[in-house]
Amino acid sequence: MTLDPLEPPLLPPASPEDGAAFERLSLGVAARLSRYLQVLTQAKKMGKETISSQELSEYTHVNSTQIRRDLSGFGKFGKRGVGYNVESLVSQIRKILRTAGQHNIALFGAGHLGRAIAGSDIFIDHGFRVVAIFDVDPEKVGMAVGAERVRPLADLHAVVEEDDVVVGVLAVPTAAAQDLADDLVAAGVKIIFNYSEALLDVPSEVTVHTSSPAVDLLYALYFYLT
C-alpha cells in the first residue's frame, strides 16, 4: 500500500484487545489525527497545558469543526470555553493510533540527510527510536552517527529480527531505493519511509510513505494562492 505523499506513516489503530474498542480508521481520519498529534506534541514541549480547536486549526489547516468532529468520535476530550488538555489528548491520540510506547527504526544512508535524521528529535518525540544506521559505503561503515555506529547492509536481517525493527527509513539516492525496499520486505519490515524520489514497488501488505519537500511546498503554495 502506498500512502499519499502528504500523509504520515501509521501503525494500525488500536484494537479492542488493546483496551480501546476503535474500528479501523479511514486514511483521512488517521492522517488528520497524526497532524493533531504533531502539533500537540510540540505544544507540550513548549509548556502549553490547554489548546483550543481553533488553535489546532491554525496550525494544521484543518477546519475547527472537523477537528471537533474527529475527536468527539473517540470520547469527550475537551471542555467548552477551556479547550483540550494537551497532555491528555496526546496520550489518547497515541492510543488511538497505536503509537504509544517505543517503536524501532532502521535508517539507511549515512550521508547529510541520514545524519540529520539521526540527530533530530522528530522521531523520538513520537516514540520512534533509530536503533541501526546502514550504508553501503565502506568508508562510512563504523563511523559514529549519534549514539549508533554505521553498519554494513549485510547486518540488515539480523538487526530487524534482534531489535524488532518496524520501520525502515530510506535516505538514499533514488537509484538505490528499490533494492533496499526489496531487502526490507524480505527481512519482514512492513512500513517504509522513503525520502527518495523513487516510486517503490512493494507487496500490498507493506505501507510506503514518500516524503518530498517539493510536494510539501506545492501543497503550501496551493493554500497561499487560494
Image (cartoon, rainbow, N blue to C red):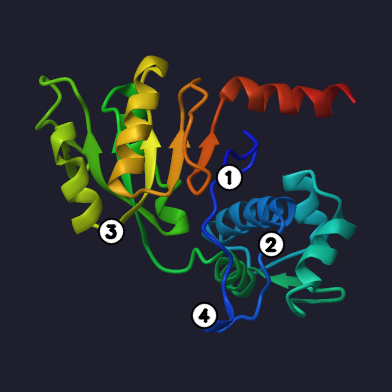
Do callouts 2 and 1 mark residues in contact (Cβ within 8 Å)?
no
Residue in front for this viewpoint, 203 or 104: 203
Q: Amino acid at mark 3?
A: Asp
For the point 29% across and 28% down, which residue is it? 109
Q: Judge by depth and name the residue closer to the eye, 108 or 2.
A: 2
* Residue 2 pos. (x, y %): 58, 38
Among numbered discs 3 and 4, the one appearing first in the sequence: 4
- Secondary structure under badge 1? loop
- Badge 3 is on which residue? 164
| Residue occupying image coordinates x 59% and y 52% | 38
For the residues labelled 2 and 1, the Cα–Cα distance comes to 14 Å
Distance of mark 3 from mark 2, alpha carbons?
Answer: 25 Å
Q: CA distance from mark 1 to mark 4?
A: 22 Å
The residue singled out by tag 2 in the image is 25
The mark closer to the camera, 1 or 4, is 4
| Comes first in the chain, label 3 or label 1 | 1
Residue to which mark 1 is pinned: 8
Quadrant of residue 162 in the image?
bottom left
The residue where tag 4 is placed is 18
Name which of mark 1 and mark 4 comes first in the sequence. 1
Q: Amino acid at mark 1?
A: Pro
Q: Secondary structure at mark 3?
A: loop
2 up-or-down from 128: above or below:
above
Quadrant of the rendered image containing residue 93? bottom right
